[in-house]
Amino acid sequence: MLSPEGLPAIQAALDAADLDGWLLYDFRGANPIAAGILQLDGLVTRRVFAYLPRHGTPTAVTHAIEQGPWSKWPSAWPRVVYSSWRELEAAVSGLVRGRRVAMEYSPGDAVPYVDRVPAGVLEMVRAAGAEVRSSGELVSRFYAVWTAGQLAAHRRAATRIAEIGQEAQRRAGAAARRGEPVTEWELQQWILDQFRRAGLETLDPPIVAIGPHAANPHYAPGEASSAQIRSGDVLLVDLWAREPGEPFADQTWMAVVGTAADERTSAVWSAVRDARDAAIALLRERAAAGRPVRGAEVDDAARGVIESRGFGRYFVHRTGHSIDPRDLHGSGPHIDNLESREERVLTPGVAFSIEPGIYIPDVLGARSEVNVIMADGEAIVTPDDYQRELPVV
């Protein structure tokens, strides 16, 4: 991440934002953004700071007993070693006094995924005479962006996951037709086996849910408690995986089993699909025109469709989450103007899900999920052949 080769781009961004520097802080992994950018090698149990100035060379502030993890820190860049809290505070003060610095801080906790620095550390930095601003846009640009290789790996995973998700639905339909219905848990286990066969890794088991169970966005089927998938059921399959070490692909597929959807199900599905497509249309329009678009605007576009269909009170989560190179729910910009105030620009290289949903308690849940990667002049949607209609399986 942070390297002599990449430093000029960071310093140019600091200059454009009229910031004197970017102050990174971490303690025992509390700030994964700083940890990811610094890429320290080994156990770190004491507080660390690294100051990236608008001009000149970065400076690290490190504890005396933990020099080993800094072996990759360029020898030409200063390293201040401390033992006592007095030495630590003096070192930080010397770096930031009278300067305007960015930190992983979000005013009013507007964006929790950026709000990583404890209030006490902010007090220390401000007491040293620094003005602290949010590093949110820097995080998007230098922590959350994908490389071309990561995009290629994601697209391979997205293609295979789409095949697995649709085949899972067909298997459920075939089993129901034979009179030997599978359970939600059994279908979930089949998906996990397909991931293993494809060389994909995941974090948690996929969601397989019918009707009322799908009304819980985080439903988890259990071996003993899951339902059989029968004719007439509305089936939701939400699955996410990646090639080892690469960015995740995250999708949701819907189907009805055995018979055509009833009027209510059709209305709910159409609202979800059209909300998804409204978000995609806005992203593509702005990208093609070279105009900025913010996560909150995209959330508003999707939410407006569902509200116009009379289902607004049942859309209870954000439209999408950041997918950064390391994390399925990343620290880049989210598609959100409900749970948080996501005002960051969706810059080229950032990725996220688009997944509007409608959840009518104890009745029905529906969601449609694709992923979007912003690029120069376009918004790339994966999988390439995403769901348009509600199939009968």
Image (spheres, rainbow, N blue to C red):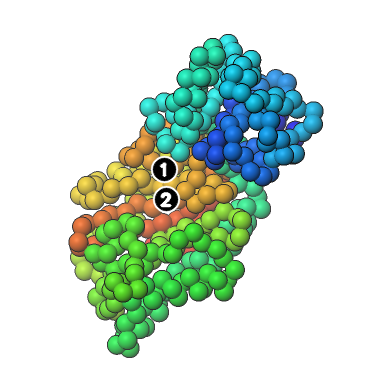
What x and y, as percent, mark residue 80?
70, 24
Q: Quadrant of the N terminus?
A: top right
377 or 295: nearer the viewer: 295
Q: Is residue 201 above or below residue 380?
A: below
Q: Would you place residue 49 above or below residue 222 in this image?
A: above
Where 176 sits versus 293, above or below? below
Is residue 27 positioned above or below 22 on the image?
A: below
Residue under the image location 53 percent in, 37 percent down: 31
In front: 78, or 235?
Answer: 78
Residue located beneath label 1 in the image: 335
Other residues around mark 2 within 10 Å, as few (<14) / some (14–19) / many (≥20): many
Q: List the single residue furthest toward the bottom.
A: 178
Measured from the top left, where is residue 202 in percent x and y? 51, 61
Left or right of residue 387, residue 73 in this image: right
**Quick one: SS at disc 2?**
strand
Left or right of 385? Residue 79 is right
Q: Picture quarter containing residue 201?
A: bottom right
x, y percentage for residue 229? 30, 76
Q: Residue at x 64, y 47 (%)?
A: 147
Q: Quadrant of residue 339?
A: top left
Res 64 seen here: yes
The residues tagged by marks 2 and 1 sit, at their Cα atoms, a distance apart of 7 Å
Circle 2: residue type: Ile
Q: Amino acid at mark 1?
A: Ile
Q: Which mark is residue 54?
A: none
Q: Residue furthest right?
A: 76
Instruction: Tell me the residue at 35%/83% (across/down).
Output: 175
- Which quadrant is home to the C terminus? bottom left
Q: Which mark is residue 354?
A: 2
Whether residues under marks 2 and 1 lie with C-beta atoms below 8 angstroms apart, the answer is yes
